[in-house]
Each structure stands twice: as structure tokens, then as C-alpha cells.
Image (tube, grey):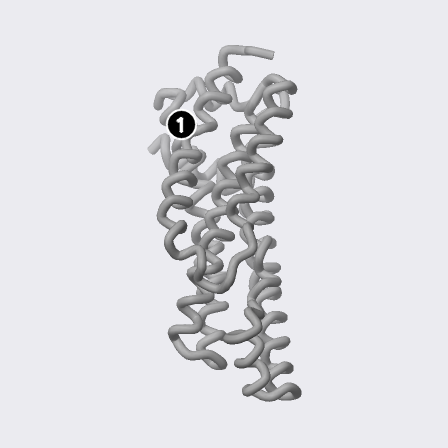
């Protein structure tokens, strides 16, 4: 029963941010597909295919930082309120164990972000199938996957930085985190990231528990 209360509390904090971000993401996908439709109508399918296959044009590039923005928004919405007057210490006193409560909060935020990404990029895939063959859509998703992982990494790093009680460590984490996130956005041709995606996934998964260190320092009162 206690875990339901934790989930409900987290939902109250992020619900409007999550809904608003998802709606904006959907609008972005809609605008992108309207642009594709316009290009097919006025430039012709032959020219579009030529630009994609031979000139390396990535028609989905406007989505590059959509996931990154989502990760940062949800991290701030979920964890910044916990730092006001050290409110998170109240959660640490629940009869569930400090790390367990924190991981429940973290899991809820990550799953919420995942659902939002599934909706946004699921619609993107469905709309793309109207204009492009399945293989082209798959290649596009392979290219987009690092950007999605960057969104999760931004969420995990955001939690780490926000919960960190010492400003000097926050500064260092921000520098290292900013450099780390650039790995996900190295320019490459479509689907070139395919061999690296598994490694990026592992790095993101490892990063998911990094906030435990900041949380430990936070609840011990280090400043």
C-alpha cells in the first residue's frame, strides 16, 4: 500500500509537465510530417528520395533534442520540489527503506518518460510508414535511439545534480554530464550508430543508479 502512496505523490508532481511535454512532442511530430508531406507535394518523391539516400538528409533531425528536453523537464519537476526545505528527508522516513523509496521514485519517473517517448515516437513511426518503406523507418529509429537514450541520461543526471547538496559537486557533475551527453549527438549518417547502441544502452542503465550517491550525501546533511 505504501508504494501506491509514493507513486501517487510522484504523479501529482509531474503529471502536468508530463502531459504538456507529450502534447508538445506530438505537435512536433505532426509539424514534421506536414513538412514531409509538403516536400513530397512540391519537390516530388524522386528528389526527396535522392536527398535522403544520396545526400544524407535526415528528415527527422528536428526531433534531435526532443528527448533531451523531456528528460530535463521531468527531472526538474520531480526532484526540485524535494530539495525545497529538504522535503525529501520526509520520504526517507517512510517504512520502506531510504534507497528503496528513492529507487521507486526514480523508476516511476523513468517509466513515465518511457511512456511519453513511446507515444511520441510511435506516432512518428506510424506517420512515416505513409511516406517511407519499413526499412527506411527502421533505419530512422536506429538513428533516433541514441537521442532517446540521451533523454533518459539527462533525466538520471538531472536527478543526480538536483539532489546533490554541495554546489561544487553540482558544478562538476554538470560539466561531466554535459560532456557525456554529447556522445549521444555525434553527427553520423543514418543508422551508423547501430553498432554503438547496445553500449550506449548499458552506459545509460549504469547511470540510472548514480543518484544514490547524491541522495546518501543529502540525507546525511552534507553541504
Give the residue drawn at x 60%, y 70%: 32
Seen from the viewer's position, the closer of residues 129 and 23 is: 129
Question: How would you rate the neighbour count of disc 1 (Cα within 10 Å): few for under 14, some for 14-19, many for 20 or more?
Answer: many
Asked which secondary structure carries label 1, the reply is helix
Give the residue drawn at x 59%, y 77%: 36
Percent x, y of residue 92: 45, 20
Q: Quadrant of the N terminus?
A: top left
Q: Is residue 176 above or below residue 66?
A: above
In the visual, does 39 lie left or right of 120? right
Give the residue drawn at x 44%, y 62%: 191
Percent x, y of residue 213: 46, 21
Q: Residue furthest front?
A: 54
Give the residue drawn at x 61%, y 65%: 27
Percent x, y of residue 194: 39, 57
Seen from the viewer's position, the closer of residues 108 and 51 is: 51
In the visual, does 124 lie left or right of 62? left
Q: Is residue 49 above or below residue 211?
A: below
- Residue 81 visible in the current orientation: no
Mark 1 — residue? Answer: 101
Amino acid at each position: 500500500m505504501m508504494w501506491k502512496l509514493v507513486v501517487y505523490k510522484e504523479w501529482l508532481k509531474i503529471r502536468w509537465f508530463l502531459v504538456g511535454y507529450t502534447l508538445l512532442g506530438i505537435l512536433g511530430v505532426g509539424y514534421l510530417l506536414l513538412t514531409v508531406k509538403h516536400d513530397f507535394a512540391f519537390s516530388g518523391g524522386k528528389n526527396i528520395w535522392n536527398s535522403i539516400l544520396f545526400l544524407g538528409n535526415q528528415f527527422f533531425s528536428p526531433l534531435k533534442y526532443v528527448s533531451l528536453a523531456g528528460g530535463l523537464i521531468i527531472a526538474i519537476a520531480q526532484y526540485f520540489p524535494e530539495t525545497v526545505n529538504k522535503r525529501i528527508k520526509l520520504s526517507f522516513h517512510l517504512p520502506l527503506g531510504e534507497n528503496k523509496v528513492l529507487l521507486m521514485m526514480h523508476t516511476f519517473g523513468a517509466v513515465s518518460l518511457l511512456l511519453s517517448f513511446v507515444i511520441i515516437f510511435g506516432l512518428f513511426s506510424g506517420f512515416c510508414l505513409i511516406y517511407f518503406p519499413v526499412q527506411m523507418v527502421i533505419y530512422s529509429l536506429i538513428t533516433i535511439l541514441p537521442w532517446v537514450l540521451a533523454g533518459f541520461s539527462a533525466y538520471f543526471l538531472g536527478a543526480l545534480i538536483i539532489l546533490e547538496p554541495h554546489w561544487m559537486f553540482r558544478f562538476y557533475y554538470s560539466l561531466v554530464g554535459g560532456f557525456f551527453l554529447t556522445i549521444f549527438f555525434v553527427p553520423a549518417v543514418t543508422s551508423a550508430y547501430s553498432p554503438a547502441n547496445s553500449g550506449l544502452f548499458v552506459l545509460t542503465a549504469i547511470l540510472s543508479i548514480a543518484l544514490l550517491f547524491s541522495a546518501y550525501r543529502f540525507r546525511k546533511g552534507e553541504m
